[in-house]
Image (spheres, rainbow, N blue to C red):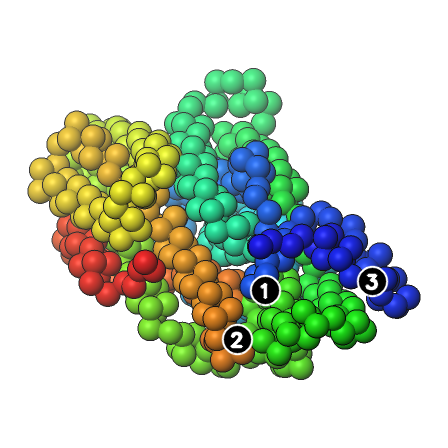
Amino acid sequence: MTLTKKGFYRALPLPSEVAKASMDRTRDMEESLLQSVTRTGALVPKKRAVGRLVMHSMAMFGREFCYAVEAAFVTPVLLSVGLPKHLYSLVWLISPILGFVLQPVVGSASDHCTCGWGRRRPYILGLGIIMLLGMALYLNGDVMITAFIGGRDNQRTWAIIITMLGVVLFDFAADFIDGPIKAYLFDVCSHQDKEKGLHYHALFTGLGGALGYLTGAMDWGQTVLGFSLASEFQVIFFFAALVFLICLTVHLHSIPEVPLRYENEEAKLLLEVTESYNYSSIEEEIKNSYLKSTCAEVNAAAKPGRYTDTSHTEDQRRMTLKSLLKTLLSMPSHYRCLCVSHLFGWMAFLSNMLFFTDFMGQVVYQGSPYAPHNSTLYLTYKTGVEMGCWGLCINAISSSVYSYLQKILLPYIGLKGLYFIGYLLFGLGTGLIGLFPNVYSTLALCSLFGVMSSTLYTVPFHLIAEYHREEESLKLQYGEQAREHRRGKGIDCAALTCMVQLAQIILGVGLGLLVSVAGSAVTVISASMVALIGCCFVAFCVRYVE
């Protein structure tokens, strides 16, 4: 039996004047949510239209578009400003270290955010602004420094500093923003819509990446914008900033959130109304802890990260990094196993993707980036890098296609099958590329990169949703005893996203040394080995909800 909130209020006699005033103040917010309260005490968001889910996914489109622009241009930009080689690893290590330390803090903070606009959207907006700032600095830093600072040596020094700062800010915000976006989806959607939303996220991630790589592959220097602006980098920034701003605006207006500050008013209203009128049916429900569970569920739905009493809310907001790390270490074992499998997946994926264009230029095309720029070896290497960009475009397109196929395969092979297949195909594909480096076979096998990409962006977060759904069922079955085990969606999504930064840190420290010793071929072989190890971990260690 399902009882809507409007029907719930009508079924009761008129409440006191105070309760009525409180209800009037929150009526608009309640009607915008259009949620329902079931007899078991669960508060279930309404079914979301496909258009709303598509609007919500536009943030992933814009984010991946900007990521593709960075992948295509950040190395040429760093080389053009004269960044010393020994500082390359520093550029790529600062951002993931910051993200790994701060990601759980922001995830927990968003669980307890009391902004009237919602819990997640203020953080998404702030991180989006930081992304734009970082992109503006690393694509336009050289031009900005030339305009404001004189002296060639000073210009070079400041251009390196500004460009490095831009890359760090962009990577930091772009990696960070994924957690709040996923938590936002989980907050406002039913379980079925969460599945659809994750698939749409993967679909638009692939489309955004493909369009970004195609934009970077075009020669904008011969266009009207190329002649109007100072450099091709400024043209790219114009398109990237425009696309991201449009996508971010659409995303932020996709689905309304319930502000956290309303939760106490809703709980107080339910308690006041039911305590004022002692119907026998309500008395019976109180004896069975139904009403208490209902009020707790209203609070939990408005603040998913809460798993302690209301009196402890202020302590949670003042949670220090030390106590937060302790909380992460005390996660249930199946959460930790999922994080480890996610770490294996991203280590394998990034090991291949970060050096793929260099692999194409040096190993597949047998060119050299260290040869004179007018030599055949260097031109051959440049051709291989351009072909590598087309391979990455194939990866992005296949990611979009596979995200659609996942919905078809899911009822037949389940999440375990999807997770296993993603790691297995990627491991086999990168292994074949490393053993048989041929242009055409490599481009064909690039489609398997998209399978892994789509898997990493959907299946782990789908499992998080399943874990929360199971915990919700336990809470309803066992009441307050299970409630203490409830974890916040924000901090769980942040813990998963932290594995991306940890993978970048590990690769930044270790893989660079391997490449300098054994060459670019070691990257795809390493990616294959790590993916196959992760495949075994996914099959035997990750827990799946039946």
Q: Position of residue 360 (x, y in %)?
A: 22, 36
Residue 351 vertical placement versus 272 (above, below): above
The reply to whether discs 2 and 3 touch (Cβ–Cβ < 8 Å) is: no
Real-space Cα separation, disc 1 to disc 2, in angstroms = 10 Å
Q: Earlier in the sequence, mark 1 or mark 2?
A: 1
Q: In terms of image quadrants, where is residue 246?
A: top right
At label 2, the amino acid type is Gly
Classify residue 346 as left or right of residue 322.
Answer: left
Q: Earlier in the sequence, mark 3 or mark 1?
A: 3
Q: Position of residue 405 (x, y in %)?
A: 32, 35
At label 3, the amino acid type is Pro
Secondary structure under tag 2 reads loop
Real-space Cα separation, disc 3 to disc 1, in angstroms = 21 Å
Residue that label 2 marks: 479
Residue that label 1 marks: 41
Front: mark 2 or 3:
3
Residue at 27% x, 29% y: name it: 387
Q: In terms of image quadrants, where is residue 300?
A: bottom right
Other-residue count near label 2 (Cα within 10 Å), few / some / many at <14 / 14–19 / ≥20: some
Residue that label 3 marks: 13
Residue at 70% x, 66% y: name it: 263
